Image: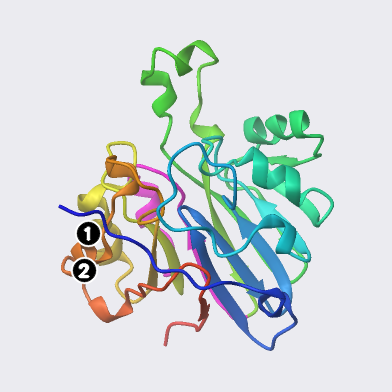
Amino acid sequence: MEQAKALRRQMNKDDFQQIDHTEVYWLGNGGAMINARGTIILIDPLLEGFDMPIYTEAPILPEEIPHADAVLITHCDNDHFSRATLTDLKGKVDSFHAPHYVASLFEELGIEAQGHDIHDKFTVVNCTVELTPADHAWQNMSPKHSKVRHYEMEDYCGFWIETPDGKVWMPGDSRLMEEQLTYEHPDLILMDISDGSWHIGLHGVKKLTDTYHDSKLIPIHWGCVHADWKEFNGDPAVVRDMIVNPDRLLEVPCGEAVKLEKIG
């Protein structure tokens, strides 16, 4: 079956301007941007320098980004912790945030990052950010990667972001966890739709979306990397047929703004 391919909209400086509402952008792969009334937050931006064939190009290059208030990184995999992207963003970003282990990796890039525990909260201008737990320590099962260190649960996270206009949740790369089904309804979920064994999987997608049956959903982590791997081969059409209220699944091109609106 042919791999689903994401569409793309070229972003520009207007996407970073002061606005009177909040907009959410999928940046391709597992990345996103939030413009919360002019506060710019980048999550896991992979905008250049990836070591696998690119199927859909990133909607913007680091050099084209005028400024960001914060960069948030969920974990150390190079499709989320992009050394090339982060190096070229250095000097344009006010603060970098990640779990403690990931924050330590910024040192080799000459970047000072703030490390956090799971459930820590911090403020980025007019937004409150909380780290949520994730289960993605696949490296411990790898003969190669397990030699580096024993990876802990606290090395991986998602981000719950409360903006002036609603709540955005990025669960991150994670197998479904019971705790992830206990939150108040987010207004929008940046939802990994990968069916890999260390990702949420289609069964997890069904359970998560049944739990948060009113949340708007932007499918991410699909259609941008050309690879015969389940981790990159999600298909929103498959997901749409599985979920309650399928019209809330917003299959948007990477780089296209989605206005955040509160449920109800």
Q: Is residue 183 magenta?
A: yes
Query: Residue 157, image x and y in percent?
Result: 52, 44
* Residue type for callout 1: Lys
On the image, the x and y values in percent for residue 68 come to 75, 62
How busy is the neighbourhood of tag 1: few (under 14 within 10 Å), some, or many (20 plus)?
Answer: some
User: Which one is nearer the viewer's eye here, 74 or 252?
Assistant: 252
Span of residues in magenta: 165-185
Where 219 falls versus 106 (above or below)?
A: below
Q: Number of labelled discs? A: 2
Q: Which residue is mark 2?
A: 243
Mark 1 to mark 2 CA distance (whole Å)? 6 Å
Whether the residues at callouts 1 and 2 have beta carbons within 8 Å, the answer is yes
Residue 206, numbered label: 1
Structural crowding at the residue carrying mark 2, measured as other residues with C-alpha within 10 Å and reported as few (<14), some (14–19) or many (≥20): some
* Closer-to-camera residue (74/47): 47
Element assignment for label 2: loop
In the image, residue 212 lies at what x, y percent?
33, 68
